Image (cartoon, helix red, strand yellow):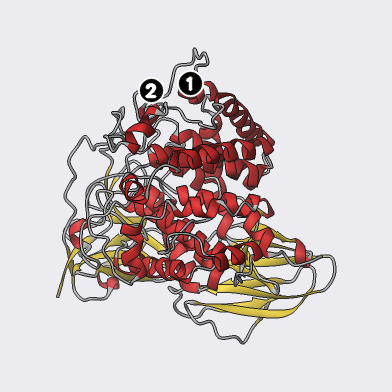
Amino acid sequence: MSSPSRRDFVTTSASALAALSLLPALPADVAAHARRGDLQFRVRPFDLKDVRLLPGVFREDVEVNRRFMMGLDPDRLMHSFRITAGLPSTAEPYYGWEAPNNELRGHFVGHYLSGCALMAAQLDDPAVKARGDLMVAELARCQSPSGYLSAFPEELFDRLKAHRPVWAPFYTLHKIMAGMLDSYSLSANTQALDVVKRMTEWVRHWAAPVDDTQMARVLNVEFGGMSEVLYNLAAVTHDFSLLDLAHRFDHERILGPLAQGRDELKGVHANTTIPKIIGAARRYEITGDQTAHDTVDYFWREVTQRRSFVTGGTSSGENWPTEPGKLASQLASDTEESCVTYNMLKLTRQMFTWTADPRLADYYERALFNGMLGTQHPADGEKIYYTPLASGYWRMFGTPEHGFWCCHGSGVESHSKFGDSIYFHDDDGIFVNQFIASSVSYPYKDVRLTQETSFPREDRTRITVHTMAPTAMSLRIRVPYWVTGNASLHLNGRAMSVRLKPGSFVAIARTWNNGDRVDFTMPMSLRIEPMPDDPTLQAVMYGPLVLAGKLGHEVTRAGPTPPRMSPDFTAPPVAAPVITAPSADVASWVRSVPGKPLEFTTVGQQTNVALVPFNGLFDERYVVYWKVATG
């Protein structure tokens, strides 16, 4: 059995990125590079179908999302597409951002296609696959002879070209194109590939008469990941003429300063920007454009190190309102848009394949456990728009039939694919990045791993190797940055004498026999992470988990959403207590509750407050950043 080739990686990667070059067109040598596909990846992701989630919080979350997605009515989702195509529809449309008077209508359907393809692969679920195939077939019926396909008429694109007010037509078109390409890449739906190829020809025809000056104005209106999906389609079809079309969606005003190592993100809309960076990463992968690589690398480091909260999320009021490192003033009811976390996870996963840098895996864990897990309500699968970090607010979820925000769409994708970044591999073996109950099949080595754990409720995981014959392989396990105390590694019950350095991978290279097991213990402890510009604002962490203080149950769901609005809180926040800490040591004011894993309480305060993992706190007000007076 041969090692996966570069072509295999490009063709099967459905989460790729898009474009950046400061050159006016694709040079011949770069085009040749794309045809050869000679970029070397340090590691590669497993196909989602090769990873299975075992019982645990992540599997439960995916099952909740499955019930939510399969509970939606395809005819209602299709209503505006059919009306736009001149086909009859008697279905009652959905509302919120899918309402017939909303200029983004149809965007959720694109996400829904991707969600079905991802979930069908994650769960090996024929019913979910059949739902996705049904949606593809019905959308194909609505496609015009020109290739145009949307839930709104072409008139919105006429307004865009004429620079008249319009919301974001290419944003919606991208979601549909990406959903079709995912349906092909993940679910082998060839009709979906034909639909997206015809859509692309419509885009090519639309953009052909638009000169560079006019296109620069077009790109000031949010356009999602248009460059990403065009690069992905070029990789899948080997039609490298699409690279120049993708390049037309590179936004020089945003990408240029980043390419030169300048943070000019103040006032910029976060979720408009990150897909452009994802595009740059994909351009680097396909063309080898070093400028694109440097742009992505600088952006990731700047956002994760200087513009992110303790949860790994970023943005406030959907923007970056301040200079980097100035986060204290950003705490609000509309911090941390969920789409932004979705896209940062997507970008981080992509970058990890380049270098296998453990810092990327550490950030992924932080954002996954604290910024993504908890954005879906466990009762009904409704999704959250913002995760408030101002004290005294609560998580506010959508109302059935009246949400369908951008974060609803990215949410059905995020909560369908938790297995996609647990494991990676190279030609020598497997990387274990995340500690999530799961199994992975590695056909190249004829090996399957199972990971049994209830992490983070316990501080250990067990990895068992299943193989038909003795197999030489390297198993690399991430040693998280937060590990404290006596971390240990046992092979078949015997302690291993290896260095377990936090923030690294430990490698076990040996010939493995069927049933060999590795037990990894990673002690967790309490610690403080203060605001960089205000050390009196402090968040409490335990291992990888952000802890939140419980402030009471007076909360409500979101109401119906007007066409261009995000949810509004219907009640003011409540005040969080100011903490008096005898010393800078977190143990001076926070203690664990004996006999109750992952439960804590403040001590020595006028009113003590219970603390629990932030990702499991629903229908209750909370505090994440405490005001602490020390001394």
Q: Nearer the viewer, residue 67 or 131?
A: 131
In the figure, 239 relative to 379: above or below? below
Residue 566 shows in the view:
yes
Residue 64, visible in the rendered structure: no
Crowdedness near tag 1: few (<14), some (14–19) or many (≥20) residues, C-alpha within 10 Å: many
Image quadrant assignment for residue 136: top right
Q: What distance separates the C-alpha of mark 2 from that of mark 1? A: 9 Å
Q: Where residue 591 sits: x, y (%)?
A: 32, 66
SS type, badge 2: loop
Q: Nearer the viewer, residue 289 or 296?
A: 289
Which residue has dot 2 on it? 100
Q: Amino acid at mark 1?
A: His
In the shown orientation, is residue 601 left or right of residue 507?
left
Name the residue at 41% across, 30% down.
105
Q: Are marks 2 and 1 in contact (CB under 8 Å)?
A: yes
Q: Position of residue 503 (x, y in %)?
A: 47, 77
Residue at image location 58% in from the left, 79% down from the top = 506
